[in-house]
Amino acid sequence: MLHALAQPGRPGLPWLVFMHGFSGDAREWQPVGGHLNDYPRLYIDLPGHGQSIGAEVGDFTGVRQLLRDTLKRYNILSYWLIGYSMGGRIAMSWACEEAAPGLRGMIVEGGHPGLTDEPTRQARWLSDSDWATRFCRQPLTQVFDAWYRQPVFAGLTPDARRALVALRQENNGPQLAKMLLATSLAVQPDYRPALRTLGVPFHYLCGENDAKFAALADELAAPHHIIHAVGHNAHREDPERVAACLAHILRL
């Protein structure tokens, strides 16, 4: 089972189950969830992160098993999954492979649906393996400074990048490395076909300045929502606007 923070809401409403991105923790979505307090909310620490640092998995199947155990522990029978980046990919894995009866819908922010060809998968595995080695061997300050200079984070100001690097020092490098490889895009299926036939609502959101994921959103047969004037980490940059977007989706 994964560590999680549960907050009550109005009886009869579905739970909002929030999953953070790589190197985040259960606190990541709380500024957004605080605007949605009519709903019961569950903020999860994913394996190797936060207070789930001792939870180790080898693949997406292992992550789904821990998520299944966690939902059971909190007796969550009706819920929406809301995930950012890695958390969004885990949400897609759950929705496409679990066929869980309690799932009412899914909202993914900046999550990749999957790679489509073997050369790209091989290149991604080499890249993720290199990052994993760095997380195991180098000081986290050094690794995260490089991590947040990747093109997907190009919209970060120097001050925002420094703040994220400082925040991520609370992590454990070797545990991050294990989770990075266990949930690498290189080993994730391409979920596009399954996402087109989901039996529950699926919404995709991303920042206006996140060109890579805005383009991916256009490939998905799902409503997508653009959060203006922000980049890849939209819910951190503008939690109020992201919360308003989620509230709109939940009212549909």
Image (cartoon, grey):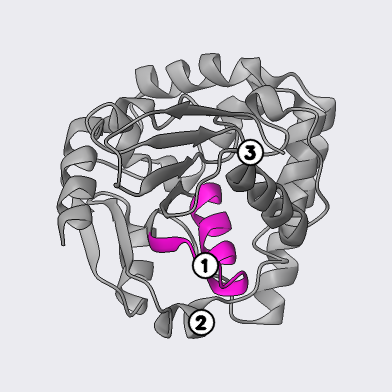
Few, some or many C-alpha atoms within 10 Å of disc 3 (few <14, some 14-19, many ≥20)? many
Q: CA separation, marks 1 and 3? A: 17 Å
Q: Is residue 246 magenta?
A: no
- Of label 2 and label 3, which has the lower sequence position? 3
Question: Foreground residue, 219 or 144?
Answer: 219
At a point 39% along the width and 41% down the height, the residue shown is: 154
Q: CA separation, marks 1 and 2? A: 9 Å
Above-or-below relation of 16 to 196? above
Few, some or many C-alpha atoms within 10 Å of disc 1 (few <14, some 14-19, many ≥20)? many
Residue underneath mark 2: 194
Question: Foreground residue, 149 or 210?
Answer: 210
- Of label 1 and label 3, which has the lower sequence position? 3
For numbered disc 1, what is the local secondary structure?
helix
Total marks drawn?
3
| 236 to the left or right of 250 | right
Which amino acid is tagged 1?
A: Ala
Kindly indicate whether the residue at mark 3 contacts the one at mark 2 (C-beta within 8 angstroms). Answer: no
Q: CA separation, marks 2 and 3? A: 24 Å
| 125 to the left or right of 208 | right
Residue underneath mark 1: 95
Residue 169, quarter of picture: top right
Above-or-below relation of 4 to 39? above
Residue underneath mark 3: 46
Residue 124, quarter of picture: bottom right
Q: Look at the image and give the residue range highlighted in magenta.
A: 86-105
